[in-house]
Amino acid sequence: MTKSNDIRQVIIIGSGPSGLTSAIYTARAGFNPLVIEGYQAGGQLMMTTEIENYPGFREGIMGPDLMQEFRAQAERFNTEFITADVTKVDLTGNVKKVWVGDNLHQSKTVIISTGASANFLGLENEKRLIGKGVSSCATCDGFFFRNKTICVIGGGDSAMEEAIFLTRFASKVYVIHRRDKFRASKIMAKRAMDNPKIEAVLDSVLVDVLGDNVVKGIKLRNVKTDEISELAVEGMFLAVGHTPNTKLFEGQIDMDKKGYIITSESKDELTTTNISGVFACGDVQDSRYRQAITAAGSGCMAALDTERYLES
Ligand code: NAP
């Protein structure tokens, strides 16, 4: 086991908008942060298309391009990066311990910004057909569905965004939603429903995904009539919300019942956790706003709280 004798000032776990913003701030403050960015660096924006609501980009910017800018800005101020996943942490003492495989990294503070991941519905055939027509990432896999009929499950902004994006490839996109009203913002829902390639199937839940080796269709149950129907689709995209990436911290950090890290117990410092010297920012502690800009904002707050902690 390799042990680094250096005790760093700041380790940041995660590299979405919140983690990289906290890196930019702590780096500029001279704390030489180490970002352990994960194998899937950049967070959820790496899987989005155009972002139209991130201030400063009036023509919009592609998610991966935005994250590249964040990372380059953090690098400019000498942030160090490790492109791997953290495998274990011990956050209890004054010196925090973070392992990447056999390598131990030690630090006075840790900023957790591990974000959240896409949910699946938990059906056996859904799992079996992942990568064979079932996907949670329209931008990654949309290309494979040129001129095909596909569906998106969900009624939030992500479902609308994915459905609209998928019309670039697919000939028809059904949006399957379990209620009769979308959760999505009015503007996003209207944009999707105005698209001639998109058709809503409301009050419907998925009961099965059909197909032996690839997706051939889906089986739905109408929640009002209990009627079962089948829809022929060759692709199914999940957009049914997210789960915070907090497994690593279970038993060490206070979380709510959905697994989001509890912050803002203190009125003075909104990113503190129950452990002194450990801060959290971004989607891992925010089930409400979940925007790139709010994540970046909370990353800045975590950096300022960390700086204050280190200086006191
Ligand atoms: P969300 O708002 O939580 O929506 C999840 C959707 O999935 C809901 O419609 C929900 O149904 C449905 N769902 C959840 N579990 C389900 C299940 N087991 N079976 C069937 N349906 C299920 O998540 P999101 O769409 O990923 O959006 C997350 C946040 O990011 C939101 O704040 C959103 O505004 C934001 N966002 C913004 C943009 C943008 O502005 N460009 C794009 C994407 C996301 P119910 O409605 O019945 O609960």
Image: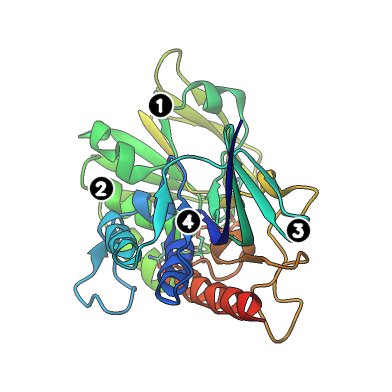
Quote the CA–CA distance across marks 4 and 3.
25 Å
Q: Residue at x 34, y 73 (%)?
A: 54
Residue 297 or residue 59, whichever sits in front: 297
Q: Reading the chain from its start, which is encountered first: label 2 or label 1?
A: 1
> Quick one: SS at disc 2?
loop
* Residue 146 image offset from top left, x and y in percent: 21, 34
> Quick one: SS at disc 1?
loop
* Residue 219 image offset from top left, x and y in percent: 53, 30
Q: Reading the chain from its start, which is encountered first: label 4 or label 2?
A: 4
Give the image quarter of residue 227: top right
Check contact, mark 2 vs mark 3: CB within 8 A.
no
On the image, numbered disc 1 is attached to which residue? 131
State the mark number for residue 34.
Answer: 4
On the image, numbered disc 2 is attached to which residue? 167
For residue 134, above or below residue 278: above
Give the image quarter of residue 133: top left
